[in-house]
Image: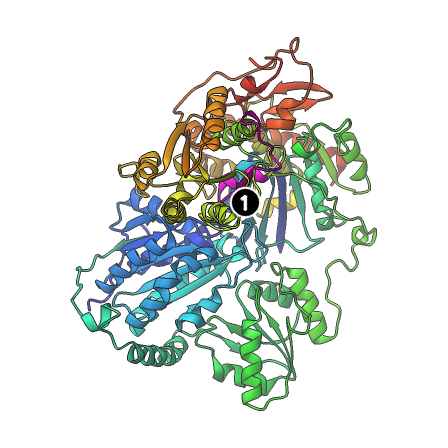
Amino acid sequence: MKSVEVQRHPDNAMHDELLLGNEAIAEGALESSVEVATGYPGTPSSETLQYLSKKVLSEGLQVYVEWSTNEKVAIDTAAASAWAGKRSLVTMKAAGLNVASDTLTNIAYKGVKGGMVVYVADDPGTHAGCTEQDSRYFAFLSSLPILDPSHPPEAKEFTKIAFELSEKLEIPVILRSTTNVAHALGNVPVVGTVVTPRNFNFKKELTRYTTILADRMQQHAELLKKIETARHAIDDHGLNPLILKNRSGVVVSGVSWTYLQEAIHTFQLDLSTLKIDCENPWPTEKARSMLSSVDEILVLEEQEPIVETLLKKTAAESGKSVHIIGKEDGTMPRVGEYTFELVASGLSKLIGRELTLSNGSEVAKKGIKPVEMKRTLSFCPGCPHSATYYVINRAIAKARLSRRDVIVTGDIGCTSMGVFKPLETLWTEVTMGASIGLAHGFKVAGAKNTVIATLGDSTFFHAGMPALVNAVAHGSDITIIVLDNGWTAMTGLQPSPTSGRTALGKQATPIDIARVAEAIGAQTVVIDPFEVAKSTEMVANTIKKSGVKVIVSRAECALQSSRVGREKRTKLRVNEEKCKSCGACITTFYCPAILVQDGTYSIDSLSCVGCKVCAQMCPFNAIE
Amino acid sequence: MKYELLMAGVGGQGIITLSELVATSALKKGIKVTATQDKGLAQRWGSVKAYVRLGDVYSPMIPKYAANAILSLEIAETLRYLDYINENTILVVDTKRMIPKDNMLEKEDTLSPLKVKKILSPYPHVFFVNAESGSKEAEFGTNIFMLGVLLGLDGRLKDFVTVDEMKETVKSMLRSHVSENLEVLERGASLGSELRDADGV
């Protein structure tokens, strides 16, 4: 196999750039001559491919970047490149790895030729509203090596190591970050690179690339051997650094290492440390050395007690009676992200001395607590989703049904905000595409109610389509409303299959959801959510019919249309003579552009995009 | 030596841009930067904060009671971060109030500018600024104006970022309205130095 050639860009000497952890990973991939990068958008992972596509476009790099339909498609696409000898990267959020895991566990057996890195970003603290799933478990589930960087520059370095490891061991390598690595900004040394393409070289090897003809148990045995071999390769890269200083030890992984460094420097601590860069394979020897050199160990890791469990296992095997504190004894939490203060309190317990910055602060002694206040998220001004939910609420009334009886299941993405006040249309929000399966499920369970599912266009293609097929194939009786705004908006306006363009800005065929739904066999209606009366009528009529109905509510995301200046619409204003201050625009619809000050209503001309929904809903026609 | 800057506001006010301007300026000078931002909710009118940590720093988040400065673009949002203030923390606060939709129809704003000012009164270095009128009611750039005020006001920041360095960064980072933003930055900085002279910080 041809070795990787990374040529320095002639005008571009090594220099520091301010990059997010996610962007640093993209730079690491470029310096590793990645040729194919795929993924599905998901906070906090999305900036890796966004940065790559920007770079590819501005510098004319020979890298293929794709926002795939879902994570399963993304990992399949990346795997093929790796089988053909090219280096590939696939990116996703934690929930996405659940979707991609079917292929992940399978290709672990089959292995790869070109290096393949599977990047997953976990979200302790649930900033993006998902679960606190610890994706490190997937490394054990699939018997694949995992690298766990602590900060942006390391994220770049580990990406490069991951590609090398993957190619050396011929298996995919998982690269895992958490929010405070993925979304942290830091100085990252960057070399402008020119990716050197490799030849496409995929050979028919039926006993390897098929499952039915492969000796799966032998493949499994080989995989287990590879993960053992990985230990040496990982040592060669100097990972899992061990520093023995005194009888108090800290074993630490991920971003917690940065809080530990902060504490060591702030409080002048002298501690033995073992930094776990790689949970699988577990650095047994280094863990043993640590256990022989200290009396007590604090384990610092966000999320689940994985390092803690492995360390305790090593301690038990080697007969060391070292006192290990961490999550299981309650010293550190299993819920939420770690902070400097949490790490400092864990260290206080370890060394038996109070470590706190608030000591001596007169202000802290006053005990003034931060003020709690709500600031619920809103749909943007001019958001078509906001209009659609308003229409759905009105249509339920128009169909002489009660909103207490009509079950409306929701889905992931911007559409999930239909749960907030004042719309409060949605009853559920689970995982990508689940709105349809749940809606069908309520009917199967015997619901006499009218049941509606709502989801976005990207979500529909991601995992909604199989559920629609299932509903039609089983003669279900539900209405599915696809809020088609043409983009994957929540994660930063990535293209969706309805956008008609790719991650690299190429023209593509926009896929018409109405035609898809029709082909599947659903009764299909298309509405314009900004035509409130007409759309209300159409939705009311549709939900009364039996069978599987699909309503496509189609209007482009307001952020995107105002960003590209596609449509300049007249901004609205409140006619103060007509306005009766009834508050209906706030209590039944709500738009951030509508302001109320001392009982007087006005429209913020900077925010208003002129969608006219408020004008159509105002009972006194006071908005013009 | 380090400088810890917490920026607070509401999605859409340009907090993330501000934090990137400061971080980029420092980086150009060869200063170590760690920072985090609330990503993903910026366009959705939620509360947004950013930490920018410069100098001898390791982790992305500012420790409690350790902010050198808090720059707040919405007066009530400041109150979320009282546990970052110590006796030397400088607060530069835009008096602008954006009432959350949750409270919009309440008879009285429980966190009106007057009430917030009262809550903040025990703190020694709080500077209230009306950015909208200070920036001459520019349709944009109140965030840049506020940044200018901080740069003019807090002498400790000079070792990390100066007004002139910030101007260069604005030129290289902002895509539109560059000259207007430079003017607004300048205007903010001169207000900042006036406030400093008056207060004797």
The answer to which quarter of the image holds residue A305 is: bottom right
Label 1 SS: loop
Q: Position of residue A467 (x, y in %)?
A: 40, 48
What x and y, as percent, mark residue A441? Answer: 49, 49
Q: Residue at x 37, y 68 (%)?
A: A105
B14 falls in the magenta region: no
The residue positioned farthest toward the top in the image shown: A577
Residue shown at 48% from the left, 16% from the top: A570
**Residue type beneath disc 1:** Ala
Identify which residue is drawn at 47% across, 56% down: A95
Residue placed under numbered mark 1 in the picture: A447
**Above or below, comparing residue A189 to residue B111 in the picture:** below
In x, y percent, where is residue A545?
45, 32
Which region shows up in magenta?
A397-419
Magenta-drawn stretch contains A398:
yes
Q: Is residue A160 visible?
A: no
Name the side, left or right, on which B106 lies relative to A128: right
Q: Give the letter of the chain under mark 1.
A: A
The quadrant in which the C terminus of chain A is found is: top right
